[in-house]
């Protein structure tokens, strides 16, 4: 697979910064627009030089990611996108817990949303991602699992907000409504964005309180 640079990859690059790429790197149109807007330069180097320039910091980041498991699941409508993004998750160094489905044969999305949400709540996975045609049903189903905070995201802003403000631990994506590039950027930002805590912690705690009160009825 050829290296790919998207707009999501430029999130942490400073204004007028530089990104090292190899001659075979694919730079998406959105990434080109973002780079032009912020004055970011793409410097083309041989693969060997790029590997050396990455340095020990990149190796440390890879080791940290390798310890993180991402649970994924999809119904028949989301199967193809699940398989496509699974390759990127591997390239990014994450371990994958694939909970199905394994084909485009018709299945029911609540089964996979529940499986992914349970894996996250039990601690079998760090975060979870569910794919169906629109992403709506899987979000509703996953949120029925106590402890799951599923967010349907459709752009970079919602991906960042759901993690930073809501501490979302399950991402749902609508495979029929998003291009592969857009879905990849959403996933990359969602995984990379930490929970901000602070005033947002109080609000997340109130979400947990709603679950606790409902369980007592």
Image: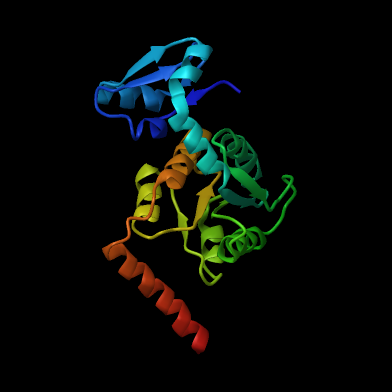
The relative height of residue 17 versus residue 119 in the rendered view (above or below) is above
**Whole-percent x and y of residue 77?**
63, 47
> Residue at coordinates 52% horizontally, 83% vertically from top-left?
215
Quick check: 123 left or right of 164?
right
Residue found at the far front of this picture: 56
The quadrant of the image that shows the N terminus is top right
Residue found at the far bottom of this picture: 217
Residue 142 in sight from this viewpoint: yes
Quick check: 1 left or right of 12?
right
What colour scheme does the image use? rainbow
The relative height of residue 123 versus residue 132 in the rendered view (above or below) is below
> Residue at coordinates 40% horizontally, 48% vertically from top-left?
159
> Residue at coordinates 46% horizontally, 46% vertically from top-left?
191
**Whole-percent x and y of residue 5?**
45, 25
**Whole-percent x and y of residue 164?**
35, 54
* Quarter residue 113 falls in: bottom right
**Whole-percent x and y of residue 140?**
52, 64
How many labels were placed on the picture?
Answer: 0
């Amino acid at each position: 697979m050829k290296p790919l640079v998207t707009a999501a990859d430029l999130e942490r690059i400073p204004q007028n910064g530089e990104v090292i790429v190899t001659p075979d790197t694919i730079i998406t149109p959105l990434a080109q627009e973002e780079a032009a807007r912020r004055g970011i330069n793409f410097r083309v180097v041989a693969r060997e030089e790029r590997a050396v320039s990455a340095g020990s910091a990149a190796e440390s980041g890879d080791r940290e990611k390798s310890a993180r498991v991402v649970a994924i699941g999809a119904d028949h409508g989301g199967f193809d996108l699940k398989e496509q993004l699974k390759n990127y998750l591997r390239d990014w160094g994450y371990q994958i817990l694939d909970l199905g489905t394994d084909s485009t044969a018709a299945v029911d999305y609540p089964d996979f949303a529940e499986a992914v949400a349970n894996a996250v709540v039990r601690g079998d996975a760090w975060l979870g991602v569910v794919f169906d045609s629109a992403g709506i049903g899987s979000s509703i189903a996953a949120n029925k699992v106590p402890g799951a905070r599923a967010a349907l995201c459709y752009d970079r802003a919602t991906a960042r907000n759901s993690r930073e403000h809501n501490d979302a631990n399950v991402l749902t994506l609508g495979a029929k409504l998003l291009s592969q590039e857009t879905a990849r950027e959403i996933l990359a930002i969602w995984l990379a964005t930490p929970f901000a805590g602070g005033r947002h912690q109080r609000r997340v705690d109130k979400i947990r309180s709603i679950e606790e009160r409902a369980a007592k009825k």
